[in-house]
Image (cartoon, helix red, strand yellow):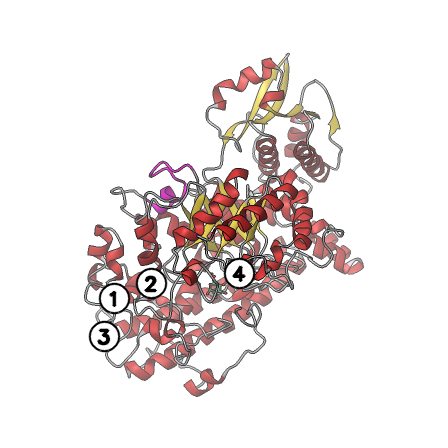
């Protein structure tokens, strides 16, 4: 390893940009030469030639990926062959000769249309490896799996792998605008170069598709949910078509966001009322027009009557009216509508955490079969920690699609190392009790709880034109982990971290073990230094960068942090119990009951559900104020530990990534201290209690923290249309 590093340094010296940029760009698809001669030879003996039966761009992509990986692993070419020991066969089950298809027949019932089987078989006296599935995309997924087995240095001599995705629509949501800015994007501009499409097809488009296919993501919404209707014009459909053609071989469907007022804006119709016959016809024609160009178009994602976006309520119609009208337009083409439940209104005095539930739950069972209602993981907005959204336990007759945020809008942007699959896992494991005990959110989402025909999960992408796609090298792990959990929502986030580290950096235990631990702890660290004990939405306004618990001057009450923490001299926290907003009644009984008392509420959710006095006695016997302060401090110390852990990793990582992560960790440490100091200084005004001795005194006064301004913080949208 050391030798490798010296030679790498030489390369960096002579070819500074190319070498470094390349490794980071390759994400987890780093097909590094396998150094262990014994292991390498065993793989070479087992894979001597490749035979692809059938003909399709997807099978070509499979062959191409395996061949490339092979050349990189072994510095040898994988030759085409027809028979012999060590043959690797890739084929859709329909194309397999009967002796081979018979040998996997009994496993076929165990996979769905995107699943795959990888088997080591004896065929005419030869040992061969077979990758098959019911579709070519299944074969592609199987090909990536075989490559991964080798990246992880696993034994491939006796393979009997049967795997299928548990969720059908595994989709990235890009909040990308047509001018290439990305709302809440911290990794450069949008990948989609709309101006130069359809003519200029960038290699990044293919690499984006490869990366997504390797983790089973099968859909991408190209445009921002704060939508621009221009994307639905002929001029843009041609550009979308060009992207769809690049993604198709990789099993990725393209979706667009539909601005609800598009018919009106087109000038063809003078309303966007979903019950108006001309409007219905407009959408049907639009769908036909899109499908004529993009036959496998996925459908529309819609943000309606939320944060200024138009919707059916503008015409006194309901979300059901709006969603079903669009659903009818795409149904003849097998399209779907992903209708977002992220709605709240400044005119509604009800607790914001309750509003989406109040608005949607009465419609349970009324949406058409091809509608998925897309619900954020928590009832507010992608905070570092939220309890699961109560809608997941309240709409058994509606397919609910999970929406996670991979981009770190509220978690330190792209400069904080926060491994998000840990957060995703926490939500997926929560019990909704909708059908009694063990009715986890994962079971709601994968449809197994109430036998859903349509299932889906979305992640708001953290991808941009940054050379390494995500800005922070570890941002790639949240993209990767989202894909893995979308495939199997029961996976452990720790297992995912380990495989990502091995594929992205190195298999050495001395690296993988401590850094897995660092990643796993990173999520709790950010909760502690930003929003401990159930606090939420106390970031600065607009750009959402840094602390702003004092903000109280925004026109919409529920945009102000003071609305959420409600700190006063009596105490802190949002009372959502029966004596408060009663948001708890939206949860099933064991939760509603248990969380109604602070004593039986998990401390991680304490101030989410309760307003408590500053001297409230916590489980450790200390006051609430004391614990708040020491938890902020613990968050800072956790980042200090991350810095120390990373310092020992230099010999395992290329110089560019090592240094970049080191520098980002310093930013994270500085900002963790900023959060601690600014929040404690502000809350102390109300608690009037001393900051415990073990916590450093803030460096500045409140006036200083309040005075900080960041007019050019990235990711903000200049104005909401
Ligand atoms: C795309 C939050 C974000 C907005 C985002 C919105 C949403 O309010 O700050 O940028 O808009 O969520 O999810 O629609």
Q: Residues within 10 Å of mark 2 (few under 14, many from 20)?
A: many
Q: CA distance from mark 4 to mark 3?
A: 56 Å
For residue 308, side relative to residue 241 (left or right): left
Q: Is residue 418 magenta?
A: no
Which residue is tagged 3?
613
Name which of mark 2 and mark 3 comes first in the sequence. Answer: 2
Mark closer to the observer (4, 3): 4
Q: Residue furthest right?
A: 14
- Is the Cβ of the residue at disc 2 closer than 8 Å to that at disc 3? no
Q: CA distance from mark 3 to mark 1?
A: 18 Å
- Is the Cβ of the residue at disc 4 closer than 8 Å to that at disc 3? no
Name which of mark 3 and mark 1 comes first in the sequence. Answer: 1
Which residue is tagged 1?
581
Name which of mark 1 and mark 4 comes first in the sequence. Answer: 4
Of residues 21 and 414, the one nearer the viewer is: 414
Q: CA distance from mark 2 to mark 3?
A: 22 Å
Tell me if residue 555 can be seen. yes
Element marked by disc 3:
loop
Taking the spot 52% from the left edge, 62% from the top edge, the residue there is 226
Mark closer to the observer (1, 4): 4
Q: What stretch of residues is rendered in magenta?
A: 440-453
- Is the Cβ of the residue at disc 2 closer than 8 Å to that at disc 1? yes
Which residue is tagged 2?
353
Q: Residues within 10 Å of mark 4 (few under 14, many from 20)?
A: few
Which residue is tagged 4?
270
**Picture coordinates of residue 34 (x, y %)?**
67, 39
Taking the spot 59% from the left edge, 67% from the top edge, the residue there is 663
Asked if disc 1 is less than 8 Å from ligand 1, the answer is: no
Taking the spot 38% from the left edge, 64% from the top edge, the residue there is 344
């Amino acid at each position: 390893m050391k030798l490798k590093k010296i030679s790498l340094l030489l390369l960096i010296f002579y070819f500074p940009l190319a070498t470094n940029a390349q490794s980071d760009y390759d994400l987890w698809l780093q097909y590094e030469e396998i150094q262990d001669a014994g292991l390498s030879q065993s793989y070479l003996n087992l894979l001597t030639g490749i035979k692809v039966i059938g003909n399709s761009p997807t099978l070509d992509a499979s062959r191409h990926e395996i061949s490339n990986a092979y050349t990189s692993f072994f510095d040898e070419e994988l030759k085409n062959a027809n028979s012999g020991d060590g043959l690797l066969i890739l084929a859709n089950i329909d194309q397999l000769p009967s002796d081979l298809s018979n040998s996997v027949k009994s496993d076929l019932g165990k996979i769905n249309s995107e699943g795959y089987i990888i088997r080591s078989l004896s065929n005419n006296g030869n040992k061969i490896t077979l990758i098959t599935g019911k579709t070519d995309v299944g074969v592609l997924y199987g090909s990536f799996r075989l490559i991964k087995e080798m990246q992880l240095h696993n034994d491939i001599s006796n393979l009997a792998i049967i795997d299928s995705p548990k969720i059908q629509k595994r989709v990235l949501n890009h909040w990308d605008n047509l001018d290439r800015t990305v709302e809440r994007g911290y990794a450069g501009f949008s990948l989609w170069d709309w101006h130069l499409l359809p003519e200029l097809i960038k290699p990044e488009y293919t690499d984006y598709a490869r990366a997504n296919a390797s983790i089973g993501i099968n859909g991408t919404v190209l445009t921002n949910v704060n939508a621009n209707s221009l994307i639905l014009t002929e001029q843009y459909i041609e550009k979308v078509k060009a992207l769809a053609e690049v993604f198709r071989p990789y099993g990725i469907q393209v979706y667009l966001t539909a601005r609800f007022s598009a018919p009106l804006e087109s000038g063809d119709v003078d309303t966007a009322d979903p019950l108006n016959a001309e409007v219905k016809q407009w959408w049907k024609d639009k769908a036909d027009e899109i499908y004529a160009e993009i036959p496998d178009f996925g459908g529309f994602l819609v943000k309606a009557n939320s944060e200024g976006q138009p919707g059916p309520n503008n015409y006194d119609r309901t979300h059901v009216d709006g969603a079903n009208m669009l659903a009818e337009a795409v149904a003849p083409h097998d399209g779907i509508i992903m209708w977002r439940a992220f709605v709240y209104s400044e005119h509604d005095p009800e607790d914001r955490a309750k509003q989406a539930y109040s608005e949607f739950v009465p419609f349970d069972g009324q949406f058409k079969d091809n509608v998925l209602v897309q619900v954020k993981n928590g009832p507010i907005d992608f905070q570092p920690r939220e309890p699961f959204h109560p809608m997941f336990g309240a709409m058994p007759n509606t397919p609910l699609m999970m929406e996670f945020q991979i981009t770190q809008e509220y978690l330190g942007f792209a400069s904080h190392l926060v491994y998000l699959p840990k957060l995703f896992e926490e939500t997926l494991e929560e019990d909704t009790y909708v059908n009694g005990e063990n009715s986890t959110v994962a079971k709601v989402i994968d449809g197994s709880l109430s036998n859903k025909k349509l299932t889906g999960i979305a992640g708001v992408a953290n991808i941009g034109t940054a050379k390494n796609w995500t800005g922070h090298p570890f941002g790639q792990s949240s993209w990767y982990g989202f894909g893995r959990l979308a495939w199997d929502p029961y996976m452990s986030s720790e297992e995912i971290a380990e495989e990502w580290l091995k594929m992205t950096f190195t298999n050495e235990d001395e690296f993988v073990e401590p850094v897995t631990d660092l990643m796993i702890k990173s999520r709790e660290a950010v909760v502690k230094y930003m929003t401990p004990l159930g606090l939420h939405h106390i970031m600065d306004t607009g750009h959402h960068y840094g602390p702003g618990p004092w903000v109280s001057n925004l026109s919409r009450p529920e945009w102000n942090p003071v609305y959420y923490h409600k700190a006063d001299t009596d105490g802190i926290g949002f009372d959502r119990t029966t004596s408060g907003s009663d948001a708890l009644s939206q949860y099933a009984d064991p939760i509603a009951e248990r969380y109604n008392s602070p004593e039986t509420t998990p401390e991680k959710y304490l101030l989410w559900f309760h307003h408590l006095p500053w001297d409230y006695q916590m489980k450790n016997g200390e006051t609430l104020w004391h614990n708040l302060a020491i938890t902020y401090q613990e968050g800072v110390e956790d980042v200090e530990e991350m810095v120390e852990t990373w310092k020992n990793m230099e010999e395992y990582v290329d110089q560019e990534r090592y240094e970049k992560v080191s520098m980002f960790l310093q930013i994270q440490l500085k900002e963790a201290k900023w959060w601690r100091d600014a929040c404690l200084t502000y809350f102390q005004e109300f608690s009037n209690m001393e900051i415990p001795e073990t916590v450093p005194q803030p460096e500045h006064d409140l006036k200083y923290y309040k005075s900080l301004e960041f007019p050019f913080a990235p990711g903000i949208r200049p104005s909401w249309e």
